Image (cartoon, rainbow, N blue to C red):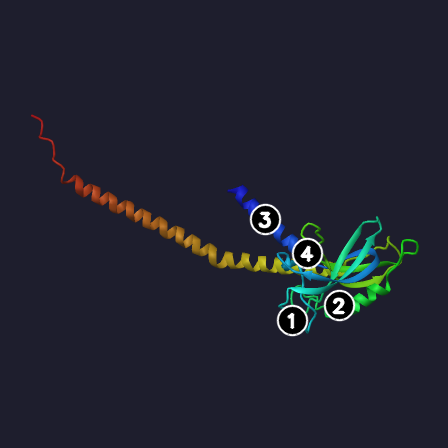
């Protein structure tokens, strides 16, 4: 039973961790090399795409999507999509994909004269499933070695931890005041019922014994 319990909590924590890692904002130090618009047919991986720009038909499957192509300091490429999130989830309330595309285009640089930028995004990059992280902001930085402190993530995780601790404290108090006494009363009631049943069985057994044929007296 202990292994089942630990397996359950590991699965729950893994799901919560994956959800937070996908949803919370991250920042990459990259160099923008190109911006473009591609026609995308959203299929089985539609849950990893956002929506059409606010004001357009949200039910269309085939649509134009803005992309920002970048290069990391180690020379490896990473491509971001640039889609509105609107008023849906995740709650970035991003409505300015066109403006962000213009900012990214203005920051295009070459290897010989690099302009490093901090690109804020959420989501994952998976080449096998054609999944791209969604860019939500971009700004120039001094260089690839700049230190960025994720203040927003720290605040969000701190608030989330406080909420979890408050809920846990409320649950423990509710359990101590309501559930534990109920369980204790139920156990005592079961014990009384079991004792009463034993007493009744004893009475019936003694009554049946009175009907048994007694052996003849010895001479």
The location of residue 155, given as percent across then percent down, is 72, 61
What is the crowding at mark 4: few (fewer than 14 residues within 10 Å), some, or many (at least 20)?
A: some
Neighbor class of circle 1 (other Cα within 10 Å; few <14, some 14-19, many 20+) is few
User: Mark 2 or mark 3, which is nearer to you?
Assistant: 2
Q: Earlier in the sequence, mark 4 or mark 2?
A: 4
Mark 1 lies on a secondary structure that is loop
Q: Nearer the viewer, residue 158 or 209?
A: 158
Q: Earlier in the sequence, mark 3 or mark 4?
A: 3
Mark 3–mark 4 distance (CA, rounded to whole Å): 16 Å
Q: Residue 11: which disc?
A: 3
- Label 3 close to label 1 by CB (< 8 Å): no
What x and y, as percent, mark residue 82? 74, 63
Q: Mark 3 or mark 1, which has the lower sequence index?
A: 3
Q: Residue 166 falls in which quadrant of the image?
A: bottom right
Q: Is residue 159 above or below residue 208?
A: below
Disc 2 residue crowd, few under 14, some 14–19, many 20+, Cα 10 Å: many
Residue in view at x 69 percent, y 61 percent? 40
Rounded to the nearest angstrom, the CA distance separating label 2 from label 1 is 16 Å
Question: In this orientation, which residue lies closer to the viewer: 94 or 173?
Answer: 94
Q: Quick one: label 4 or label 1, which is nearer the N terminus?
A: 4
Q: Residue furthest right?
A: 112
Residue 35's image quarter? Answer: bottom right
Image point (41%, 54%), residue name: 185
Residue tagged 1 = 57
Residue at (52, 59) in percent of width and height: 174
Image location (x, y in percent) of residue 194: 32, 47
Q: Which residue is mark 4?
A: 22
Residue denoted by label 2: 97
Label located before the other in sequence (2 or 3): 3
Task: Kindly indicate whether the residue at mark 3 contacts the one at mark 2 (C-beta within 8 angstroms).
Answer: no
Nearer mark to the viewer, of 4 and 2: 2
Depth order, front residue of 215/153: 153
């Amino acid at each position: 039973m202990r292994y089942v319990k630990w397996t359950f909590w590991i699965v729950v924590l893994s799901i919560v961790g994956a959800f937070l890692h996908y949803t919370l904002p991250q920042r990459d130090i990259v160099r923008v090399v190109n911006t473009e618009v591609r026609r995308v047919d959203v299929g089985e991986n539609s849950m990893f795409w956002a929506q059409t720009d606010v004001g357009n038909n949200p039910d269309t499957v085939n649509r134009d999507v803005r992309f920002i192509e970048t290069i990391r300091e180690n020379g490896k490429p990473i491509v971001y999509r640039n889609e509105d999130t609107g008023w849906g989830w995740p709650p970035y309330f991003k409505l300015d994909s066109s403006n962000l595309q213009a900012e990214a285009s203005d920051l295009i640089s070459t290897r010989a004269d690099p302009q490093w930028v901090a690109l804020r995004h959420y989501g994952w990059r998976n080449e096998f499933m054609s999944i791209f992280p969604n860019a939500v902001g971009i700004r120039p930085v001094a260089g690839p070695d700049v230190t960025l402190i994720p203040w927003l993530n720290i605040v969000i995780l701190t608030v989330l931890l406080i909420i979890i601790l408050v809920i846990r404290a409320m649950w423990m108090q509710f359990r101590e005041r309501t559930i534990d006494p109920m369980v204790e009363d139920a156990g005592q009631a079961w014990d009384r019922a079991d004792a009463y049943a034993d007493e009744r069985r004893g009475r019936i057994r003694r009554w049946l014994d009175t009907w048994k044929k007694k052996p003849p007296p010895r001479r």
